[in-house]
Structure formats: C-alpha cells, structure tokens
Amino acid sequence: MENDSRKLIIASNRLPFILERDGGSWKLLPGSGGLVTALAPVLRDRGGIWIGWPGLSGTADISGQISRASDEAGFDMKPVYLDAEDVRRYYKGLSNEVLWPLFHDLQSYCNFDPSYWQSYLDINARFAGVIGEQAGSGDFIWVHDYHLLATGSEIRKAGISASTGFFLHIPFPPLDIFAKLPWRSEILRSMLDYDLIGFQTPRDRRNFIQCLRTFVDDIAIVGKGQVIEARAGEKTIRIGYFPISIDYTEFSQLAGSREVADAAWFIHEDIPKGKIVLGVDRLDYTKGIPYRLRAFEDFLEKHPELHRKITLVQVVVPSRRDIPVYEELKIEIERMVGEINGRFTRSGWVPIHYIFRSLSRPELLGYYRAAEIALLTPLKDGMNLVAKEYCASNIERSGVLILSEFAGAAPQMKKEAILVNPYNIEQVSDAIFQAWTMDLRERRSRMEKLQASVARNDIYWWVNSYLKASLAGALDDFPTVST
C-alpha cells in the first residue's frame, strides 16, 4: 500500500473531548489527561482516526457534536456507544474497580465482581468491531491502555489483518500483585494477540515478562535492549518500553506567550509573598495528595522562619466522583487543607491555596511559570506528564522539580530532579526546604538539563520509536496532512 493511503488508527476508552449539558444544548470541551496530551498533536499533523467512547450512556444523538469535534481537532473520530450497564460493569467495574487499583499496587481497593469480566470482554469486542469497519490491511492499529487489554484477541477473531500495537499508560504490577487477578491468564493471553506491546519503563516490562513466565505455558523470551521478543507457538510478539512524552515545542512556545505571561503575573499578584510550590493532579488516590499535605505541614512545623515566604498551590482536577472512594478522597483533602490553613494562616498569608476544578491551558501554564517549585509525589504513576509540562513551561529556567521515585518519569529525570519516596513525610518535607534554599545557579543548571532531555525525547520521538519497533514503519511513513 502506498504511503499516502496509510493511516494511524488510535483506539482508547474515551474520545479526546468532553460533552457537557449547557441548558438545552451540548457544550464541547477538549479532553485532558496524558493520552490526549500525547496523541492529539500526532493525529492532528498526520491524520488518521480516533475510536473511543464519547463518555455518555444512553441513546442521545450526538453525531453532530462528534463531527464538530473532528473538525476542530483536525482528525476523524468514530464512537463506540455504551449503555448504563456497560458503564457500570466495564468502565466503573473491571477497569476502575479492579485493573486501576491492582496495577497501582493498591489491591485493597479492588472489587473482584465476577460479572465485570464478561462485560469487559463484550465491550472489547465492540471496539474491535468499530476498528474493523475503519481499518485497511496497510494501516496500523494502535490500542491504548488498561480498558482495552483484550481488544487484540477480538481483532484477531474478527479476521482483521492490519498490524496491531498496544501501549499501557499505567504501571504493570509485579508478580505477587498481578497473581491476585482472577482473570490473570486470560489477560496475558489476550495481550499476546497484539504484534507489539509497549510499556512506560523497563520495570513495567520486567514485571510483565515475569508474569508471562509464570502463567503462560511454552513462552520463550529472547533478545535484549529496548525491544525484545516473546515467542508463543508460531507467533512472535515484540515487547518494549517507550517513555511517553509531550509536544515540548508547543508547551514552551505557549508558555512564552503574552496570555500566559499575564496569567503568571496575576497569580503572583494574588500570591505576593515568597515562592510558590505547585501540585497539579487528577482527583485520584494514586496521586498521594494526603501524604503531600502532611509533608507540607511538617515543613511548616520545622521552618517557622519561612512562614509568609512560601505558599502551596494544590490544583485537583475533578475525576470519577461517582465512585465513592473518590468522593471520600475529596472530603479528606479538603479537611486536611482546612486544618493546615487553620493552624498556620496569618494576616495576609494563607499557606495552602486549594483549587478544585479543571484549568484552561493558558491558566495551567501560568501556574507552571509562576511556580518556583513543582511538588509531584504520586504513590505510583505510569509516567506523570505534568513533570515534563512543568519543565517545558519553565522558560526562566529557575524552577525546581520534586518528583516521586515511583513516577514513570523518575528514571529519565533522576539526576536533575529531587527524587523522594512519597510515603516518607520527613524526606518530602526536607526536599521542599532543599528546593527553597537552592541557589539560582544550581536551579538553572538542573532545569536546563531537564528541558534538554524532555525536548530531545518529545512526543514525536515517542511515536516514532514505537512505530519503528512495531515494524509498521516510522512516523514519516504516515503522510503529513495538508492545511
């Protein structure tokens, strides 16, 4: 097939937009999260198709909204519809009450309801059906994340001949955690029906290989380096690690715009005293926000001389609030913020500014520019693109990054960031003090190296390295869209 007819087909749980009711009509908002941040620029520049759930349950006619979203995004979108029971069992159930907590080593949050599994398989088959309607034999089908682990098997059952790849955006758990999954063997065999399986880090791939060797008979692992092979019968599956990234140029250019500069100025006007420490997270128990708040409280207790000279801005983006544990987490965070502010607030200074809402891109980058310190301490994270966004947006090159050693970004950033164990309250507290007292020369040296690393290994490097490993070609083999 000629290059000009090849296309990328992306499949993920959600389409890259959000629909909200605005009176009697629909309001269309851009999607958020690492997957949208990473892949939207690629499809915009190269064309292709994005397949996913629009986020609504029921039979509302939103074809016009999907068409408008496609026009605004610059690439086609095809929906997979779910009803309320699908959402309960496949999305809230197996995806977010089983796989999400288990893959983050938090098995105590799991609900192993047997009814979830069949629904999960049914929805993965539904995704494969929509993929089959769009895919030609020369296309590359790239399936994403834990919601669609079984789609590879369903693609093969449907007789689709195009090459397939899968990328897991969250961590893959170690053997002793994964072994608790009732459908462990079925999940592994489904994943082996992809041609290429990608993980964020060598640790994730190592965990996966150990699980294969334990639960899959007649599996042989050969090779070394970034991409190795698993041989199961007559099939060979390539398995690699590809740390996801961002569009560095886009972030750095927007950070330098007048709009973002004004946003940063207004933030410092609102918080005029001292340095800003910034945390930006989705509402999720994996992000370690309560531990972070305890660490900041410990810092305030140890360093009364720095009161009025430092402020924590904690941004929490609403997420999954219809799941009880998330609503409980929100209540806990707000209780802790209230208690800490109640203890330490003085006239003209509030130690924690708490924001519970989504931020526009210019507003978010305004906070990145305004913050002298980024405090990103997830308990476990696939990558944490906020760390890379902060570095790309730090155009003064004077910011300090404090990062959890359990974030996927930690191996890439370990020499220049201050790495911490998020469970170690005193260590995180001391890291805040280290960042606050670091001289400008060291801050700039660290940030320049972080920026160079992120710029070198950007989103296009990620896509290119993945496509090369898949034997589907390289990014240049998929034509640039004329504008």
Image (cartoon, rainbow, N blue to C red):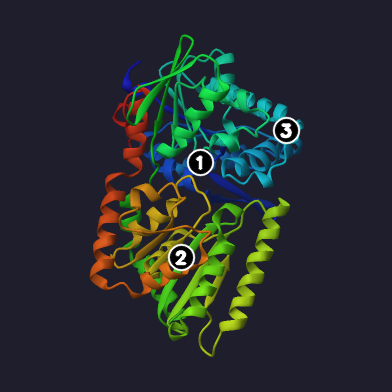
- Whole-Å distance between the Cαs marked 3 and 1? 21 Å
Mark 3 Cα-neighbour bin, 10 Å: few <14, some 14–19, many ≥20: many
| Marking on residue 383 | none
Residue tagged by mark 1? 171
Mark 2 or mark 3, earlier in chain: 3
Tag 2 secondary structure: helix
Tag 3 secondary structure: helix
| Marking on residue 427 | 2
Residue at the image point whose x is 40% and y is 18% from the top:
138
Q: Of residues 334 and 174, which is closer to you in this image?
A: 174
Q: Residue 447's x, y, as percent? A: 29, 61
Looking at the image, residue 258 lies above or below residue 419:
below
Amino acid found under the numbered disc labelled 2: Gln
Quadrant in which the C terminus is drawn: top left
- Whole-Å distance between the Cαs marked 2 and 1? 24 Å
Instruction: Please give left or right for residue 60 compared with residue 260 in the image.
Output: right
Q: Of residues 82 and 151, which is closer to you in this image?
A: 151
Q: Of discs 2 and 3, which sits in the foreground?
A: 2
Q: Is residue 460 visible?
A: yes
| Marking on residue 116 | 3
